[in-house]
Image (tube, helix red, strand yellow):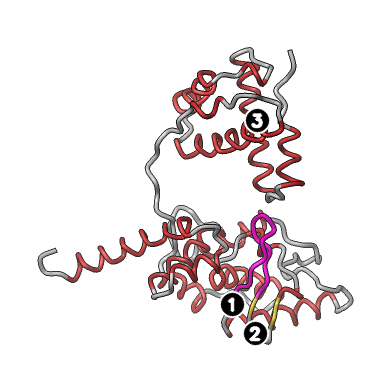
Amino acid sequence: MSMISYSSFIDYLRYEKRSSEHTVTAYGRDLEQFARYMEESLGIGALQDVTADDIRTWIITMLEDSGDTARTVNRKLSALKAFYRHEVKVGTLSDNPMRQVRSPKFQKRLPVYVEQRDMEHLFSDVEFGEEYEGVRDRLVLEMFYATGMRLSELLNLRKNSIDFTNNTLKVLGKRNKERIIPFGNKLRDLLTTHIGNYEKKFGTDIQNYYIFVAANGKKLYPKAIYRIVRKYLDMVTTIDKRSPHVIRHTFATHMLNNGADLNAIKEILGHGSLAATQVYTHNSMEQLKSIYKQAHPRA
């Protein structure tokens, strides 16, 4: 009995589809769990032997025994759907059992974001310090809030990506799609200070260096950015989630609340479709409802 293998699919994601390393890792982890369950719990080691009922059993186990949420299960099923489509396409399988599997429904949650007054408090009243790391940490937060960029995009930002003449940044987003993001003078001034600090600390010999590096000159890693974001958001908000992606949500929500066009926000965020951006209109509507209830005498 041959073991269920997904290595060729992972290679496809990494080298042909050019998915982000985060996606590759997440899909690999989900598929490993699926294969292990099939083999250890159901005694299935051959891919062609897996049926839609077997997959439904896996779903029920995750929801009822493991306590996974419908959202988590749907994420894992997304990996499985992509995997089976690939296997049929390359001829490993003739039938796709996922066509007969329905994803569990879940209550869509609105994107969590930081209130505008709290972001203003962060940048007006919180002390970051004037040394290299203090300026860098402030720049991390300002960069996320001013541009709405993703964590991976921030980590891979290099000096040559910055156009100080036009106040724009060039980033490489999902599937290696390049886009240009505008920024304002406050971010420009902070970038200039940070670059000056960098070159004073590490010299000017390194060409096109990474903007965000540790005190030893090495490129920052995701956990370091998470720690920076949590440290400072802890000072101004009590929301449960305090992550780089929450500041991306905050950027989009505040832009929309202050009159920005939805299509413009879509382009800046690098969304593939307008549907992904429209979720922020719900946050805006919730704010309007709150204002209405407070202001209207018969609300």
Residue located farthest toward the left when viewing the structure as drawn: 298
Residue at label 3? Answer: 88
Closest to the camera, between mark 3 and mark 1, is 3
Q: Identify the residue at image location x=83%, y=74%.
A: 202
Residue at label 2? Answer: 166
On the image, which quarter does residue 205 sit in? bottom right
Q: Identify the residue at image location x=58%, y=27%.
A: 96
Upstream in sequence: badge 2 or badge 3: 3
Residue at label 1? Answer: 182
Closest to the camera, between mark 2 and mark 3, is 3
- Magenta stretch containing residue 31, yes or no? no
In the image, residue 59 above or below residue 166: above
Give amino acid for label 1: Pro
Question: Magenta span covers which residues?
Answer: 169-181
Q: Secondary structure at mark 1?
A: strand
Image quarter of the N terminus: top right
Number of marks present in the image shown = 3
Upstream in sequence: badge 3 or badge 1: 3
Q: Identify the residue at image location x=58%, y=85%.
A: 185
Image quarter of the C terminus: bottom left
